[in-house]
Amino acid sequence: MLEFKQNIRGNVALGINPVGLKQEVQNQINYVKNKGSFEGPKKVLIIGASSSYGLATRISLAFGTGADTIGVSFEKGPKSARSLGTAGWYNNIAFKEAAEKEGLVAKNFVQDAFSHESKQEVIDYIKNEFGGKVDLVVYSLASGRRNDPDTGETYMSSIKALGEPVVGPNINMQEQTFYTETLDPATDQEIADTVKVMGGEDWELWMKALKEAGVLSDGVLTANYSYLGTELNHPYYGGGTLGRAKADCDEKAENINELLTDINGKALIVVATAVTTKASSVIPFFPVYCIGLYKIMEEKGTHETPIMHQDRIYREMIYGNKPEYDEVGRLRPDSWELDSDTQAKTKELILELNEDNFNSDKTAYDLFYKEFSNLSGFMVDNYTEQDVTLEELKALEY
Ligand code: NAI
């Protein structure tokens, strides 16, 4: 029998619990089902579908609107007792099993979304087996690297400041420590490379390929998740390399809007709230912002996990009657995070943090740690231990 051990290096989770991951997917499904159904898209493509925001989107749409879904992700399956694969691998499987039980189509493509081949395979599948068209395309990819599909060159993204170094507090969940970190400013090359990886180029390539192939419905919507943040994280996020990449997505949204005019389509930037994910846990200083912010938002009853946030975005905002747009047309579900009283109290709290109190009742450290653990199938609500063998895991099909 396999033993599932939580193993964290810095703020990166290495160990996973596939049984816990399955339960966590089920918990998210239950959350959506408890809210009831809503009218929305029926044929959805999600690029970056296997974890956090992409997975939550998929669950919300499948179990909220009864949508058939195609999910593209880059994950690894089990090889040995020491190498059980990635969390997203098991999330894909758990999602598919639950969706198919309800009679929904749930197709997983586990491959490099940046390649031309992936796009073509998805297009062929839409044409031949998915009814010919999709009415929503969600781009929720987060990656540290990208192979350019034309040149084969590999680009790496870096999370860095611009101009001046940034010095501030961070936490290390492995060591349970609070320390001061310095973030160097990026070179021009690093800025350009980060835009190449996390900017909107690949989103636009997907939309061009899908449009050219004639697989987009009239009135198609495409959403891309952005983050703008506040003055508390501006020096290392909005004002750093990631901010540049997000600004590039804003620009590409304009191109895509033009591309989709004749089919009445729309590209929407959704400025999402700060949540605990594999990607956000490794952004320097960001966990400290989160443990302060979540504490205040918990007290106000506005703290959300990815499933709560995405369900609200689709149920109440995009396909509901409570959308909030900013002056440039972006959807702003992050308004709860940006609430001025929330931000003022978060600032006050963060300024008081030190090595003695960062993981006390004063902050939401425990909540952040639990949400981080949930991403790997640990500390999952309603979890029941099960004996599982490597052979059984290897036999699971995505
Ligand atoms: P995540 O790391 O949990 O998920 C990323 C997804 O991309 C996974 O499904 C992964 O398999 C997939 N992926 C990565 N490289 C791939 C490749 N080469 N081919 C195919 N799939 C690939 O990330 P998270 O945090 O859910 O982020 C998704 C988006 O949401 C990002 O654009 C992020 O900037 C944005 N966002 C995140 C916020 C946060 O606090 N985490 C806040 C606001 C926006």
Image: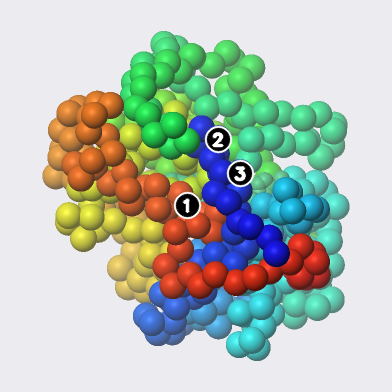
Q: In which quarter of the image is residue 215?
A: bottom right
Q: In this view, does 128 lie above or below 338?
A: below
Residue type, numbered disc 1 = Ser
Left or right relative to 392: residue 104: left
Image quadrant containing the N terminus: bottom right
Residue type, numbered disc 3 = Leu
Q: Which residue is drawn at 62% across and 29% down?
A: 157
Q: Dot 2 surroundings within 10 Å: few (below 14), some, or many (20 or more)?
A: few
Q: Element at badge 2?
A: strand
Q: Nearer the viewer, residue 36 or 246?
A: 36
For mark 3, what is the residue? 14
Left or right relative to 263: residue 176: left
Number of disc labels: 3
Q: Element at badge 3?
A: loop
Q: Residue at x 64, y 17 (%)?
A: 189
Left or right relative to 273: residue 192: right
Q: Where is residue 330 in the image (x, y as percent from the top left)?
A: 41, 51
**Of the image marks 2 and 1, the number of the one nearer the N terminus:** 2
Q: Position of residue 96 (x, y in %)?
A: 66, 74
What is the distance, in whole Å, between disc 1 and disc 3 at their CAs? 11 Å
For mark 2, what is the residue? 9
Q: Nearer the viewer, residue 137 or 252?
A: 137
Disc on res. 373: 1
Q: Where is residue 327 in the image (x, y as percent from the top left)?
A: 33, 47
Q: Can residue 91 be seen in this view?
A: yes
